[in-house]
Amino acid sequence: MYRFRLEEDENMRIIDMHCDTLIEGWRHPERSFFDGETSINLKLLKENGSLAQFFAMYLSRQEMETMDPYDILKGIYGYYTKQMETHSHIIRPALSARDIEKNRNAGLLSAFLTVEDGVFIDGKMERVEEVYDMGVRLLTLMWGYENSVGYPCSDDSEIHQKGLKPFGLEVVERMNELGMIIDVSHMSEGGFYDVAKYSKKPFVASHSCARALCNNKRNLTDEQLRILGNCGGMVGVNFECSFLQEGSEHATIEQIIGHLLHMRNKAGIEAIGFGSDFDGIDDNGELVNYSGFGRLLAEMEKKFSDDEIDKICSLNALRVIRDVVGE
């Protein structure tokens, strides 16, 4: 069976499972994708150990005031494809773990394309198949509002316990068939348990934290973390301060490591990684931008073994990609 080979050279070692950089670039096409004023750009990725970046096509409610979400998706995708063509000497799309290794061996970064919010599906299964054909290999089913798939996490306990809609169950089945990673970030607790019950493949919470450490509706309970670990899935710790610690005004490396340690205890070392949410959060705190990963990893060395850090940095994400997408 194919297995990714982790080379001795650690210059390319980080897989970050979520950022909102694409929508910022689409909104401001005058900015450089290489070295523009975003928390993630190609220069930062190249200089700070990126192996692959999950780029979300985030369907923002801001644009939905005047645009259909399907049109927003197409607009962001057009921006993405243009950047991939322009910077093909630096970064290439990846559809599998093997693609990531191929790119790395060529000295190239990898872009793993995702969609945040299944609102664009609008009850049309062919749209799931369409984004798969576009190269999307992870779909965050929900954001902050109900859609044709299900319901978002909510402070209203009645809404929070609602599960997937009948069409949502069909979406889970079709994503399993296609080889698309199901992402339950932003999803109601009831929806989470439905995905756990009906998905035949591992699933992820690409950018979430632990509720035991911060009682935020977006965070996962210890039971949810346990289920993710048991099913072969994983969670990417989010760097948003309000998910890391109640009342925190900015993210700290200590807070992030605290969530990683808790997740290791509840989900297992095989089930944790990074989901920074850079360019989707207001304050990056001590990390400043993607360059902060170096300081984070240096501090992690005090709490985790080298093998554990390798798993958190990339090997866990690569395993999930293999298990769901295929070789």
Image (cartoon, helix red, strand yellow):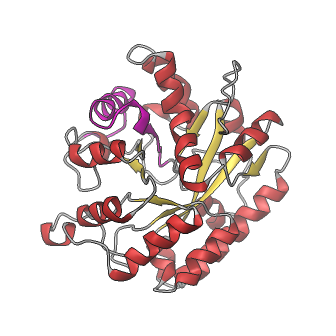
Name the foreground residue: 115 vs 198: 198
Query: In this orientation, does residue 242 appear?
Result: no
Residue drawn at (50%, 80%) of the image: 121
- Quarter occupied by residue 41: top right
**Dominant SS type (magenta):** helix
Query: Any magenta on residue 165?
Result: no
- Residue at the far top: name it: 302
**Magenta stretch?**
248-277
For the image shown, how many numbered marks are present on the structure?
Answer: 0
Is 269 inside the magenta-drawn segment? yes
Q: Quadrant of residue 15?
A: top right
The residue positioned 56% from the left and 75% from the top of the image is 128
Q: Quadrant of residue 244?
A: top left
Q: Horizontally, is 17 left or right of 80 in the view?
A: left
Residue under the point 50% across and 30% down:
311
- Which residue corresponds to the image point at 36% horizontal and 28% vertical from the top-left? 257
**Relative to residue 308, is residue 87 depicted above or below?**
below
